[in-house]
Image (cartoon, rainbow, N blue to C red):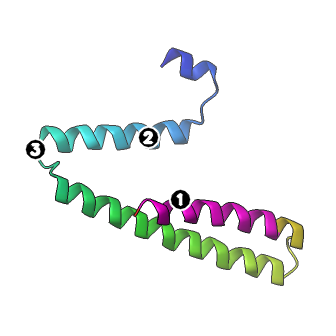
Amino acid sequence: MAADTEENIDNQLLTEVSSRVIGNLRRRADGRNDVESSIQEENLERRFRLAALRSERAELYHLRATREISNETLQKLLHDLDLMEALLIENQ
């Protein structure tokens, strides 16, 4: 981890990833890491992420409608959302 701090990794990201890894290890240690449960967790997480992307997309359209962002910015951000959404859908 010492090398990670030198790379200026975002502390919030580090905390989130660490929590996820610890949670996975605890579930595995508790013997609850069966395949069906894992699949359900992944599907639920994917649905939450897709819902969040839809909300973000709606907010971007609102920002454009109120002229808080330019059309160029909207297009770039929508493209990024499209890529993230495609990755989530592809992994179903």
The label number, if any, that marks residue 31 in the structure image: 3
Q: Secondary structure at mark 3?
A: loop
- Asked whether the beta carbons under mark 3 and mark 1 sit within 8 Å of each other, the answer is no
Residue 30 marker: none
Relative to 8, 73 lies left or right: right
Residue pointed to by mark 2: 17
The part of the chain drawn in magenta is 74-91
Q: For mark 1, what is the residue? A: 87
Residue type at mark 1: give it: Leu
Front in this rendered view, residue 10 or 46:
46
- Is residue 82 part of the magenta span, yes or no? yes
- The mark lying in front, picked from 3 and 1, is 1
Type of amino acid under label 3: Gly
Position of 4 relative to 49 (above/below): above
Callout 1: SS:
helix
Left/right of residue 84 with respect to residue 47 in the rendered view = right
Query: How many numbered circles are shown?
Result: 3
Outermost residue, front direction?
90
Tell me the crowding category of disc 3: few under 14, some 14 to 19, or many 20 or more residues within 10 angstroms, Cα based.
few
Quadrant of the rendering where the C terminus is positioned: bottom left
| Res 10 quadrant in image | top right
User: Looking at the image, is mark 3 or mark 2 earlier in the sequence?
Assistant: 2
Q: Height in image: 12 above or below 39? A: above
